[in-house]
Amino acid sequence: MNFAAQKFFVGLVDFFSIFLPGATLAYVIRDWVYSTFLGPNMHPPIDRGEAGLVFLFGSYLLGHLIFLLAAILDERIYHPLHALTDWRQITTRLVKDKELSTHWQRQLATSDLLFGTDADEAVKQAQRMKARALQALEGEHAVNAYSVVARRV
C-alpha cells in the first residue's frame, strides 16, 4: 500500500470543508434545538463525552446538508449569472449562433457587484497554458485545461 501525501491532504481539506461549516451551524443552533426538543431551559441529560460525540456527528451531518444546499445554489444562481459574463457569452452563445443576452444582464454580470470585468481571466490563462504545454505534441484538445494547470501547480 502506497502512501500519497497529496491524497491525504486533499482528503483532509475535503473533510474540513464539510465539517467546519457544520460545526459552526451546530454551535449556533444548539440552544434552539435544546429548547425545541427538550423544552425551555433544559439541557440534554448526557455527560460531556456523549455531548461531544453528538456535536461531532451533528456537525458532520449538518456539513453535508450545507454542502448540498451550496451545490444547489451554485447550479441555480451562480452558473446562470456567470453565463452572462463576456467570455462565457462568446464561448457558449456566439459559437452556437445564439443571440447574446440583453445588455443590462451583461452589464450586471461584469459589474463589481458580481464578477467584475476580468471574471474569466483565470479560465483564459489556463487555456493559454494548456495550449503552450501541448502545442508541440499537437494535443491541444486532448485534455481539459485544468488538468494541465493542476499538474504544474
Image: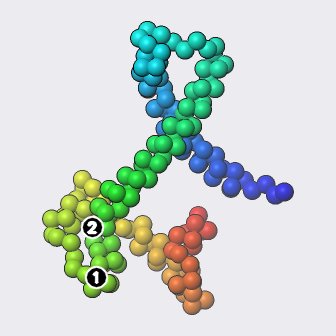
Q: Are marks 2 and 1 in contact (CB under 8 Å)?
A: no
**Residue kind at label 1, given as amino acid type:** Leu
On the question of residue 20 being in view, the answer is no
Give whichever of discs 2 and 1 has the lower sequence position.
2
Callout 2: helix, strand or loop?
A: loop
Q: Which mark is residue 84?
A: 2
Residue 50, placed above or below residue 2: above
Foreground pick, 112 / 55: 55
Identify the coloring. Answer: rainbow
Foreground pick, 61 / 25: 61
**Residue kind at label 2, given as amino acid type:** Leu
Callout 1: helix, strand or loop?
A: helix
Q: Quadrant of residue 121?
A: bottom left
Distance of label 2 from label 1 (alpha carbons): 12 Å
Residue sitting at 62 percent across and 23 percent down? Answer: 52
Which image quarter holds the C terminus? Answer: bottom right
Residue sitting at 44 percent across and 13 percent down? Answer: 39
Q: Quadrant of residue 106?
A: bottom left
Which image quarter holds the N terminus? Answer: bottom right
Foreground pick, 95 / 44: 44
Residue 20, placed above or below residue 71: above
Q: Residue 128: give x, y in percent of width and height.
A: 46, 77
| Left or right side of 63 for 53 | right
Q: Which residue is mark 1?
A: 94
Residue 140, placed above or below residue 119: below
